[in-house]
């Protein structure tokens, strides 16, 4: 018996709609959800949605936000996955995340 199924392709709008169906997540992490799902900037200019990775390292939970429009990432460390999400939410709302450029050591942008 096979458990994996190939997903059907979805438009960015369909993906965003599917992700925001869970009301408590929207209420608790609105800035994070917007970062992950918004496909346009407020004036209507196209935007690449960001990505989020949560992982463990040396007994701690870590989170990485990847800003595809600005070619940069921000990292946080916390005691639980919920605390990682809360720290990222706070950092987005307060514009206080420490972003790292994706450029290489010579300062050139990656392709």
Image: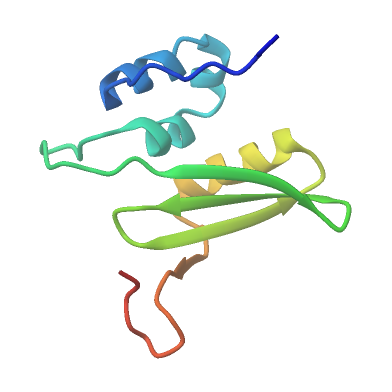
The residue at 29%/27% (across/down) is 12
Residue at 42% across / 14% down in the picture? Answer: 18
What's the image's color scheme?
A: rainbow
Q: Determine whether, in the image, residue 52 is placed left or right of residue 58.
A: left
User: Would residue 61 be seen by someone viewing this image from the given angle?
Assistant: yes
Q: Is residue 93 visible?
A: no
| 44 sits to left or right of 20 | left
Where residue 108 appears, as percent x and y from the top left, is 33, 83
The residue at the point 32 percent across, 76 percent down is 109
Left or right for 96, reference 38: right
Q: What is the quadrant of the C terminus in the image?
A: bottom left
- Given residues 96 and 22, the one toward you in this image is 22
**Residue 19, image x and y in percent?**
45, 19
Relative to 105, say whether 50 is above or below.
above
Q: What is the residue that sits farthest to the front in this orientation?
A: 1
Q: Position of residue 70 (x, y in %)?
A: 31, 60
Q: Tell me where residue 77 sits by quadrant.
A: bottom right
Q: Position of residue 60 (x, y in %)?
A: 83, 51
Would residue 24 be found to the left or right of residue 31 on screen?
A: right
Residue name at image x 46 percent, y 43 percent: 51
Residue situated furthest bottom in the rendering: 106
Circle count = 0
Quadrant showing the N terminus = top right
């Amino acid at each position: 018996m096979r458990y994996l199924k190939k997903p059907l392709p979805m438009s960015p709008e369909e993906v965003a709609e599917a992700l925001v169906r869970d009301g408590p997540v929207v209420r608790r992490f609105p800035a994070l959800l917007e970062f992950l799902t918004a496909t346009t900037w407020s004036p209507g200019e196209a935007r690449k949605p960001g990505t989020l990775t949560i992982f463990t390292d040396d007994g701690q939970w870590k989170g990485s936000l990847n800003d595809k429009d600005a070619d940069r990432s921000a990292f946080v460390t916390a005691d639980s996955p919920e605390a990682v999400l809360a720290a990222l939410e706070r950092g987005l709302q307060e514009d206080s995340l420490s972003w790292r450029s994706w450029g290489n050591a010579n300062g050139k942008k990656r392709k």
